[in-house]
């Protein structure tokens, strides 16, 4: 879309506001709102500025400064990706949203931006003549609205007037109870060019899963970013909250984003994970090996908060290690059944609380390193993965951040600025989390000590 086409699109849709979005390190949307006239003039002029500290904001809203981003803060210039422009369907008056990249004073893409981190990984594949394909499955809970943060969450009442409890996996009645919400979710997704495929009820009370159509890694990450923002808006319009928290209930299954990965040869368009006779290629096993060897050091990008690690519990529909197996949902790396074009690896480790760009980048990077270094995977695991206590995933955020900070792979491929900044943010979030009075403190310490 060129400037004139954009001008016409804004006029035809009677857009009164343009919102420039950038995903921060947590995956939240930051940016600026402006008039269409100012937006168009910024494209033709010097552009819109935003402080580089925007990428250093923690989940609690604190800007974490370090040697790469001091308090003086340089400006970055927003570069809208016009292929992502869309209408914001929840606004009363027509508003457009567009995802932006950022460039520094030397006209270079800002290397620590999450969207650029993923682009960096995709470019590594392109240099080898490969294109990574990603298909995500996203789990989330609907919960009752609340204003008391000490209370535990509860399932909302649906159209039946009843509050769901217990497990109703694949229940169609449970979907019908919130049919208005889900109808709007699909309608708004279509308006935003988010390609939703399926919707199912998952294990927990009012826990659901949607799958997005597989495709180009960056485009899929954009859709995930937009979907998470939009889904929360839709839920509030229907009087409930929607959470992507990894483990909102202590005794229920957590929420994951399962990432299905395949890799296509750009020249031929064929899947490099399978041969003509449908057998697995060496690249397929090397990709798995890279995930097995390197995912533990990339874990903060897959499990970014202290709560994320509560999800990794045996017999609770979440992996506890990096074993791989075919058609086995108890391992971290599952190989679904399928023909040559559908040969893929499902990474079941990331939680729904991730930044989509960083989680996809981490998973693809680990697989890439496995292929270029021609690593060999461990033998396929047979049986329930929960029963094997060897090679467990990191147990805590602090353990993960320590491994991440030591990782030569992260620094080599993603750069010191990102590696140190992301680790600093995670450390500050952990310190802040530890300083806050928790429901556990109130319940067991307040009157017993």
Image (cartoon, rainbow, N blue to C red):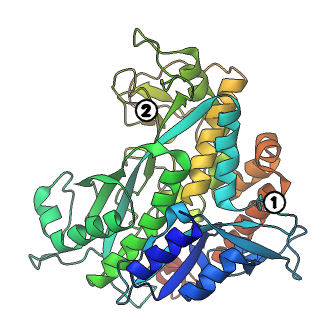
Image spot of residue 234 (x, y percent): 32, 76
From the viewer's perspective, is 230 left or right of 43? left
From the viewer's perspective, is 2 left or right of 12? right
Numbered mark located on residue 307 in the image: none
Alpha carbons under labels 2 and 1: distance apart: 38 Å
Mark closer to the observer (2, 1): 1
From the viewer's perspective, is 139 left or right of 246? left
Viewer-proximal residue among 317 and 286: 286
Label 1 CA crowd tier, 10 Å (few <14, some 14–19, many 20+): few
Viewer-proximal residue among 109 and 303: 109
Answer yes or no: is residue 353 visible.
no
In this picture, is 100 found above or below 289?
below
Q: Are marks 2 and 1 in contact (CB under 8 Å)?
A: no
Q: Residue lying at the far front in this picture: please name it.
A: 4
Viewer-proximal residue among 315 and 88: 88
Can you tell which quarter of the image residue 48 is in?
bottom right
Viewer-proximal residue among 125 and 418: 125
Image spot of residue 101 (x, y percent): 67, 65
Numbered mark located on residue 108 in the image: 1
**What residue sits 44% from the left and 52% below the top?**
257
Residue for badge 2: 334
């Amino acid at each position: 879309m060129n400037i004139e086409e954009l001008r016409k699109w804004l006029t035809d849709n009677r857009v009164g506001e343009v919102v420039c979005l950038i995903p921060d390190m947590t995956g939240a949307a930051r940016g600026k709102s402006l008039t269409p006239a100012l937006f168009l003039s910024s494209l033709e002029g010097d552009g819109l500025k935003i402080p580089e500290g925007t990428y250093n904001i923690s989940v609690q809203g604190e800007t974490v400064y370090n040697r790469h981003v001091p308090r003086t803060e340089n400006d970055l210039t927003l570069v809208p990706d016009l292929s992502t422009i869309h209408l914001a369907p929840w606004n009363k008056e027509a508003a457009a949203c567009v995802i932006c990249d950022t460039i520094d004073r030397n006209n270079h893409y800002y290397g620590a931006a999450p969207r650029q981190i993923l682009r960096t990984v995709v470019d590594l594949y392109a240099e080898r003549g490969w294109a990574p394909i990603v298909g995500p499955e996203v789990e989330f809970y609907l919960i009752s609205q609340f204003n008391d943060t000490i209370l535990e969450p509860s399932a909302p009442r649906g159209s039946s007037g009843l509050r769901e409890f217990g497990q109703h996996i694949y229940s169609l009645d449970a979907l019908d109870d919130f049919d208005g919400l889900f109808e709007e979710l699909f309608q708004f997704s279509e308006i935003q060019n988010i390609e939703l495929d399926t919707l199912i009820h998952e294990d927990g009370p009012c826990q659901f899963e949607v799958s997005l159509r597989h495709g180009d890694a960056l485009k899929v990450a954009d859709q995930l970013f937009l979907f998470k923002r939009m889904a929360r808006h839709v839920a509030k319009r229907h009087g409930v909250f929607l959470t992507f928290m990894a483990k909102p209930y202590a005794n229920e299954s957590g929420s994951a984003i399962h990432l299905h990965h395949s890799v296509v040869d750009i020249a031929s368009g064929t899947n490099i994970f399978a041969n003509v006779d449908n057998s697995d290629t060496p690249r397929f096993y090397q990709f798995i090996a890279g995930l097995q060897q390197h995912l533990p050091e990339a874990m903060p990008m897959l499990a970014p908060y202290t709560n994320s690690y509560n999800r990794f519990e045996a017999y609770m529909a979440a992996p506890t290690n990096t074993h791989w197996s075919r058609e086995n949902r108890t391992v971290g790396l599952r190989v679904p059944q399928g023909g040559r074009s559908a040969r893929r690896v499902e990474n079941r480790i990331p939680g729904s609380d991730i930044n989509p760009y960083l989680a996809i980048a981490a998973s693809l990077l680990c697989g890439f390193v496995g292929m270029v270094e021609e690593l060999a995977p461990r033998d396929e695991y047979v049986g329930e993965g929960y029963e094997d206590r060897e090679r467990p995933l990191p147990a805590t955020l602090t353990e993960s951040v320590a491994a991440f900070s030591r990782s030569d792979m992260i620094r080599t491929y993603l750069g010191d600025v990102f590696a140190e900044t992301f680790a600093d943010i995670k450390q500050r979030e952990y310190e802040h989390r530890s300083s806050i009075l928790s429901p556990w403190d109130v319940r067991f310490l307040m009157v017993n000590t």
